[in-house]
């Protein structure tokens, strides 16, 4: 359990970093009307892989925490448990879905469209809104 927790906690830095790099670089390409090239495709691919690894590890961590807990019936009654077991996972899945759609659009484009930047932006807003900042950083 400890290894999975630490991995999920550490990998989150990489996910946020890649999300920011993806967002800024697609914005630069879209504004300067640059053609989609291998550099931006690679950034998209690496970002998607990093996010999907976090998704898989998150699911494993979730199942382990869930099985180890007493009183799963209290999840919706407690703010803390609802955050950990419902809000955080659901919003992260939304974020990963947006980033994956952004990358799928990017792969198919000849010139990076603004829709890629918008999906990336929405994904990052979802991600940033439901990270347990206090327990993570504190
Ligand atoms: C890009 C996606 C994700 C990011 C960036 C992320 C990030 C984080 C961070 C930073 C923490 C706090 C770790 C700590 O306190 O040391 C955490 C906790 C957790 N994550 Fe994620 N996560 C993501 C996706 C997911 C998914 C998809 C699930 C489950 C399906 C999940 C389940 C959990 C659980 C159960 C916790 C423990 C919460 C708590 O102790 O309050 N995560 N996550």
Image: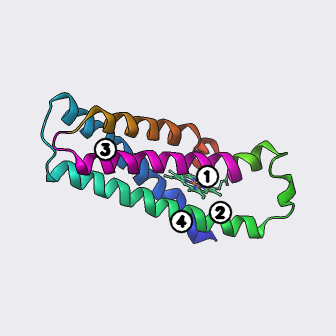
Residue at 53%, 46% (x, y): give it.
94
Residue at 31%, 57% (x, y): give it.
46
Question: Looking at the image, is 62 positioned above or below residue 30?
Answer: below
Magenta range is 84-111
Question: Looking at the image, is 51 positioned above or below residue 2?
Answer: above
Crowd tier of the residue under label 3, counting other residues whose Cα lies within 10 Å: few below 14, some 14–19, many 20 or above: many
Residue at numbered disc 1: 89
Residue at numbered disc 3: 22
- Report, in whole angstroms, how far the alpha carbon at label 2 lies from the one at label 4: 8 Å
Residue at numbered disc 2: 62
Residue at numbered disc 4: 57
- Report, in whole angstroms, how far the alpha carbon at label 3 lies from the one at label 1: 22 Å
Residue 83 seen in the current view: yes
Asked if ligand 1 lies within 8 A of label 2, the reply is yes
Q: Are marks 2 and 1 in contact (CB under 8 Å)?
A: yes
Residue at 81%, 47% (x, y): give it.
76
Query: Of label 3 and label 1, which has the lower sequence position?
Result: 3
């Amino acid at each position: 359990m400890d290894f999975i927790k630490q991995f999920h906690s550490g990998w989150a830095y990489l996910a946020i970093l890649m999300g920011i790099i993806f967002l800024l670089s697609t914005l630069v390409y879209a504004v300067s009307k640059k053609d989609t090239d291998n550099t931006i495709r690679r950034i998209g691919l690496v970002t998607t892989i990093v996010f999907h690894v976090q998704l898989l590890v998150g699911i494993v961590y979730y199942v382990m925490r869930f099985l180890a807990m007493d009183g799963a019936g209290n999840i919706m009654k407690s703010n803390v448990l609802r955050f950990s077991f419902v809000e955080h996972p659901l919003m992260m899945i939304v974020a990963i879905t947006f980033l994956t759609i952004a990358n799928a659009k990017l792969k198919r484009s000849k010139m990076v469209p603004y829709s890629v930047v918008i999906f990336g932006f929405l994904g990052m807003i979802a991600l940033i809104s439901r990270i347990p900042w206090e327990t993570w950083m504190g």
